[in-house]
Amino acid sequence: MTHTSGFAYDFWNADIMRYMEKTGTPGILSCANAALALPLTAEPGARWEYGIGMDWVGKAVEAVSGQKLGRYMKENIFDPLGMSDTAFRIGEAQRKRLAKIHARTPDGLVSTDTEVPQEPEFEMGGGGLYGTVGDYLKFARAILSGGALNGARVLKAETVALMSKHAMGDLRVRAMKTAQPPISNDVDFLEGWNWGLSFVINPEPLPTGRSAGSLAWAGLANSYYWIDPAKGVAGVYATQVLPFFDEKAVQTFQAFETEVYRAI
């Protein structure tokens, strides 16, 4: 959960990308079990590197619960919080409202047919859910409230407190240098930040108004959220644009966050 397992994503690790090319290992977005058969890039606990460790966490949840990951999350998170539009599979009603992923090219935004497999070998612990901004805001509000929302408790308050603390000892988050520019740009600003149990934690206040110690992370197609316990505010912003950390998308997100803090 701290991304110190030694696993990496090929998007930000050229060695793993070359390994996959040489061995024919499928990418993680294939949702094939073979995608998890990757070597370690470092000894466990040696450094932070964003990778498939969370997908292995999903496998662990399945092994302990005896359920598919999506079913476990539906029963224990989505249904209690009222997240009716969130799932690994796209229902008929959701597909009518589905925003396609677009790629930013020299000619502008181009629509793609990128889609997570709807009959996957495994459901990704590290990504792949479909949902709405409104649904995800319910999750963010639950974390903001110590694990409960509208009378439904999905986590103990002490669990949320543990998740919100730096969990890597002397290690810190490192910059993410792209190995696949069509998928992600370089993400340099995270250098030196803290990491909890699935959240990045900014050690200093941000110019937008976000307090030190806030929780955040993002999705590959430029979706972002933050949870600020000190000021009692959370926000969610989502696009369907690649590559990750798109300049225009990030600028809009920062402007949105700034205006939220001005409003409170």
Image (spheres, helix red, strand yellow):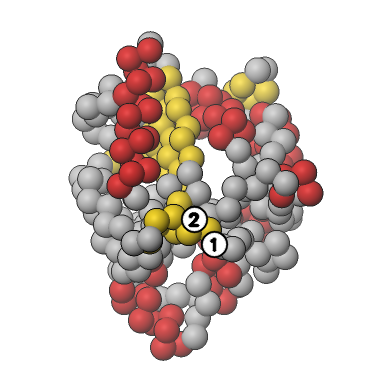
Q: Please tell me the numbered disc located at residue 102.
A: 2
Image quadrant of residue 259? top left
Q: Please tell me the numbered disc located at residue 124.
A: none
Secondary element at tag 1? loop
Residue density around tag 2, few if under 14, some if 14–19, many if 20 or more, within 10 Å: some
* Residue name at image x 30 percent, y 63 percent: 178
Q: Is residue 69 visible?
A: yes
Q: Which residue is mark 1?
A: 112
Image quadrant of residue 33? bottom right
Residue 131 lies, in percent from the top left, at 62, 42
Residue 237 falls left or right of residue 172: right
Image quadrant of residue 211? top left
Residue density around tag 1, few if under 14, some if 14–19, many if 20 or more, within 10 Å: few
Q: Is residue 178 above or below residue 234?
A: below
Of residues 196 and 11, the one drawn nearer to the viewer in this rendering:
11
Q: Amino acid at mark 2?
A: His
Q: Amino acid at mark 1?
A: Thr
Q: Is residue 51 above or below residue 137?
A: below
